[in-house]
Image (cartoon, grey):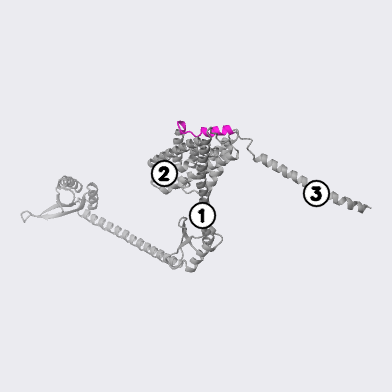
Amino acid sequence: MEKDIQKNVGPHSQENTKQNVQKDAIGLINSIKKFLLELFDFRDDTDHEATLDAIKADIPFKGATAWILIFAVFVASVGLNANSTAVVIGAMLISPLMGPILGLGMSFALNDIETFKKSLVNLGTMIGLSLFASFLFFYFFPLSQDNSELLGRVSPDIRDVLIAFFGGLALMVARTKKGTIASVIFGVAIATALMPPLCTAGYGLAKGNFPYFLGAMYLFTINTIFIALATFLVLKFLRFPMHKYANAAKRKRSSTIATLVGIAVMIPAIFTFVNVFNENQMNTQINYFIKNEIKNNKSLQLIDWDKDIEKKEIYVNFFNEITEATENDLKNELSNSRDYPNLVGFNLSIKGSDTKSFELITTAYKEKRAELQESKNIIAGLQKQITELQQTISSLNNRIEQDALNKNQKVVAFSRIAKESKIRYVNIEKIGFANVLSSKDFIKIDTIPVATIKWNAKLHDSIISPKEKELRTWLQREMELDTLFIKREK
């Protein structure tokens, strides 16, 4: 009996339990869905009128805004010149460039041709003034060398595109919120960095470095396009009301123009994203190839390497000799490996060492080092001999002078006289002294002290004559002589 009851009740109870579990699961899913909608839905927190007024208020470029832009340009230029990240960040915060860019995105989204014209004119004026001001700064205060702050703005990659796009989204969400979040606006101004690329472009113009100019302007264009695109998408998502025209034909014409301009902007934006993304993929895979296939290979001794994305060339320079088999293996890895799909069509240019082997270089280095040490030993020995000879000569001079003093107490050490003569009269090239035997009647013989002087040949006689008189007086006094004749040697 009990078994019959269990058979009748069991399946019904299981079915009820299953239905209850399904209801609970559905309820949980609905609760999560409701939570997520409340968490991420910001449409109810949007102030349409205040947002449009705030964007339009930042578009005009005159008066205080013009001076703020000029000052921001100089602050950014000083920061780039001094390689100071803090100063560059300060220039980003005070720069008013963001206003017209948001105006462009808004005019596309709302079909507002007048706002588009104002934004475009003001943005063009800002760009021109920024380039001119930075050109003047770097023309008169050029960088001593290209630094990291400058080089970081001349070669944009996929990260710059993503920063500009997501930064623009964050900015517009903050702009549309009731009670604008100022910290978000400041953060986006720092992240997107509109002012430093323009100053870098001005530096390129001042130095005549057009690759720097084009690279910096390319980065600025990326930031501008994707911030405007983010503005367009946010305003469309929030369903901001389209601009109304009294004339239906004018409205249609304006809508057509806005659509065409929007498409014209979207095409280069998409092309830029795809191009930068592909280039970034190539750079990543090239770095991976160098690390995985070359640096991790202990038999290869890499000196340096380089790349040319446009020519699809990778240049590697090795210290050791590269055999034909090794070269073919590296080229096959590059062209056939599934790890480098973006490097299809790239050519690997390999340059090995001109020597036959690393051992030969090591042996030659050791031999030259031994020869150098031997030469140093020989030089040290010769220097020792020179010192000993100098001491011997000095000793002989002292002995000669001492002998002369012993014979005649009035004789003064000639070496001292010679040295002092050179100090007093730097143009003397040679000095000599002797007692000359002389006879006028060929019977009586006199001893005449004679000093022989050789002067610098470039001196004129009018300069030498008074110097000789001074020299004779000084020599007579030093040598205690009553008379002294000066003989000039040619």
Look at mark 2 in the image and give the residue it sits on.
203
Q: Is residue 299 visible?
A: no
Which residue is the site of mark 3?
18
Seen from the viewer's position, the closer of residues 155 and 425 is: 155
In the rendered structure, which disc, 1 or 3, sits on the residue that comes first in sequence?
A: 3
**Majority secondary structure of the magenta segment?**
helix
How many neighbours does mark 3 have within 10 angstroms: few (below 14), some (14-19), or many (20 or more)? few
Residue at left offset 69%, top offset 41%: 35
Q: Callout 3, which amino acid?
A: Lys
The amino acid sitting under disc 1 is: Asn
Q: Residue furthest left?
A: 441
Question: How dense is the environment of label 1, judged by Cα within 10 Å: few (below 14), some, or many (20 and up)?
Answer: some
Q: Which mark is residue 283?
A: 1
Q: Are marks 3 and 2 in contact (CB under 8 Å)?
A: no
In the rendered view, would you say 410 is above or below 346? above
Where disc 3 sits, the SS reads helix
Direction from residue 29 to residue 286 in the image, left or right: left
